[in-house]
Image (spheres, rainbow, N blue to C red):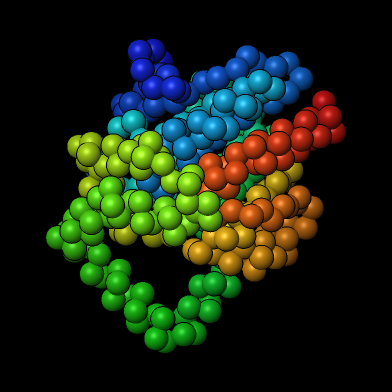
């Protein structure tokens, strides 16, 4: 697979890697450290490598840092495919083995956290550690609860059947990609609204203008859920750090954190005064926690 350089004017100039015939954008910063593992940063739904700019700037001082745009997002290609956690898992695994060329500490936010968990659990040779930041993903008991709630089940089926209609998913995509909608959404999920900058909004808006972006959005509603988080945690062998923004309106951080502890008691966790994206909202605190934890894990496993 071919790697080519990209002359970029962004603060995070990156490169393109050819994977399964598709261009994948990534950023590399810092020098390889013989006694420290590299970090691979994986963004959430609708975001990109740019969402890690505040983290890369600091973490590259101590580690070699990589960030990647998942297929269908950011500057990566947006082909008309069936998008799934398995597809993104394979993308990350191949990137680690072929480009980074050594096991990494996977760090993911939201959807990126779930995909990173899939890699660490199902491809253990690629991961020496896992950091999840307000991670997404279904638990088995959540599905059971939903099935027992007939009203919730009917509403879920109705919503899904509606969004499977091309016209409905297209109209929804056109609405959510508007700069004004992006701002309102971010202001709901960030405790510190001053962190919602025009640059951040533009970083999310710009990829939505790419050819194929609407089809990627629609594919998400057509794809079945991936493996359950509890099943993945039972397969996981590497150290796990959980960072939770307690002000996240999309999840109950304490309740969800308890579920992770139930299936992986040896994890380390911190609850932070932030929303859904603590790494971008309170980067100094998150960077410090990541650095300290990775160094401690490295000392334990030289």
Between 60 and 115, the residue placed more toward the observer is 60
| Horizontal arrangement in the rendering, residue 174 relative to residue 87 (left or right) | left
> Residue 301: image x %, image y %?
82, 31
* Residue 127 in view in this figure: no
Between 85 and 191, the residue placed more toward the observer is 191
How many numbered dots are placed on residues in this image?
0
Image point (41%, 41%), residue name: 197
* Quarter of the figure with residue 291: top right
Residue farthest toward the right in the current orientation of the protein: 300
Image point (59%, 53%), residue name: 274
| Horizontal arrangement in the rendering, residue 282 relative to residue 91 (left or right) | right
Between 135 and 220, the residue placed more toward the observer is 135
> Residue 199: image x %, image y %?
38, 36
* Residue 51 in view in this figure: yes
| Horizontal arrangement in the rendering, residue 263 relative to residue 211 (left or right) | right
Image point (42%, 19%), residue name: 13
- Rendered position, 291 above or below 43: above
State the quadrant of the N terminus: top left
Residue farthest toward the left in the current orientation of the protein: 167
> Residue 44: image x %, image y %?
46, 46
Residue farthest toward the front in the current orientation of the protein: 194
> Residue 128: image x %, image y %?
69, 34
State the quadrant of the C terminus: top right
Image point (43%, 55%), residue name: 187
| Horizontal arrangement in the rendering, residue 289 relative to residue 76 (left or right) | right
- Rendered position, 182 above or below 224: above
């Amino acid at each position: 697979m071919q790697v080519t350089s990209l002359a970029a004017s962004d603060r995070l100039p990156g490169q393109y890697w050819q994977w399964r015939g598709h261009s994948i954008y990534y950023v590399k910063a810092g020098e390889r450290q013989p006694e420290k593992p590299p970090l691979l940063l994986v963004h959430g739904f609708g975001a990109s490598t740019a969402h890690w700019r505040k983290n890369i700037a600091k973490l590259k001082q101590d580690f070699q840092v990589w960030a990647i745009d998942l297929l269908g997002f950011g500057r990566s290609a947006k082909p008309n495919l069936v998008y799934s956690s398995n597809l993104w898992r394979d993308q990350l695994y191949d990137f680690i083995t072929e480009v980074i060329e050594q096991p990494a500490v996977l760090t993911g936010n939201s959807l990126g956290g779930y995909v990173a968990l899939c890699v660490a659990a199902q491809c253990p040779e690629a991961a020496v550690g896992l950091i999840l930041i307000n991670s997404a993903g279904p638990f088995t008991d959540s599905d059971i609860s939903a099935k027992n709630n007939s009203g919730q089940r009917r509403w879920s089926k109705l919503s899904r059947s509606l969004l499977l209609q091309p016209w409905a998913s297209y109209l929804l995509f056109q609405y959510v990609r508007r700069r004004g909608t992006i701002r309102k959404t971010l202001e709901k999920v960030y405790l510190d609204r001053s962190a919602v900058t025009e640059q951040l909004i533009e970083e999310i808006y710009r990829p939505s203008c790419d050819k194929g972006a609407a089809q990627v959005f629609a594919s998400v509603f057509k794809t079945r859920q991936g493996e359950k988080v509890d099943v993945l945690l039972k397969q996981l062998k590497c150290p796990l750090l959980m960072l939770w923004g307690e002000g996240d309106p999309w999840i109950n951080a304490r309740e969800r954190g308890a579920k992770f502890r139930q299936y992986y008691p040896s994890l380390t966790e911190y609850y932070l005064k932030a929303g859904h994206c603590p790494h971008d909202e309170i980067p100094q605190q998150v960077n410090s926690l990541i650095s300290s934890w990775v160094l401690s894990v490295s000392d334990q496993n030289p």
